[in-house]
Image (cartoon, helix red, strand yellow):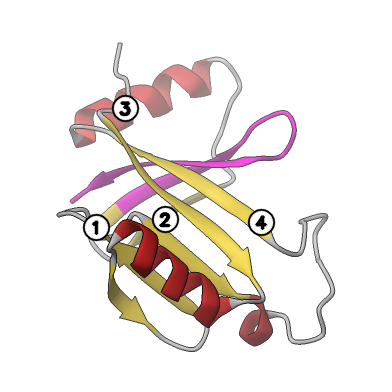
Amino acid sequence: MAKPSKFAHIVYRTRRFEEMIRWYETVFEARVQHKNPALAFLTYDDEHHRFAFANLEALDPGGKASEGKADVGVDHVAYTYASLRDLADTYARLKKQGIKPYWPIRHGPTLSLYYKDPDGNRIEVAQKL
């Protein structure tokens, strides 16, 4: 049975965008891989990113949470599979149990499947292409 080979990253929604970036740079000696007004991706090793920050001041300037999501906090956690075959096997196993991704996407060098647990927490399972 295919299992994730490693924890990949965590994404935070924040209204303290620059402060959060500086804190994670300092605490983890992380470096910015990509940054624009809405998003920032940081890493401390060879992974493309270990932390991502969604700037709610840019994405939601009015400050209202939408779709039942909390305003700030964890957006999702991500797990990497060792191979595309492992990711596909996991998809097939979960589909047989009635668990389907709410958002399959290829973004950048990654093929990702996003799921929601029973409490609505978002989990990304992915494989770097």
- Marks 2/4: CA distance? 23 Å
Q: Is residue 108 above or below residue 34?
A: above
Residue 92, position in %: x, y? 40, 23
Specify the farthest residue to the left. Answer: 46
Front: mark 3 or 4: 4
Q: Is residue 49 above or below residue 20?
A: above
First of labels 3, 1 by sequence position = 3
Foreground of the two, 90 or 54:
54
Q: Which residue is mark 4?
A: 73
State the image quarter where residue 87 is shown.
top left
Quick check: marks 2 and 3 in contact, CB under 8 Å? no
Q: Secondary structure at mark 3?
A: loop
User: Does the magenta run of residues contain 42?
Assistant: no
**Residues packed near mark 4 inside 10 Å, few (<14), some (14 to 19) or many (20 plus):** some
Q: Which residue is mark 3?
A: 4
Q: Secondary structure at mark 1?
A: loop
**What residue is at 27 percent from the left and 33 percent from the top?**
81
- Marks 3/1: CA distance? 20 Å
Front: mark 1 or 2: 1
Front: mark 3 or 1: 1
- What kind of secondary structure does the magenta stretch mostly adopt? strand
The amino acid at mark 1 is Tyr
**What residue is at 49 percent from the left and 21 percent from the top?**
94
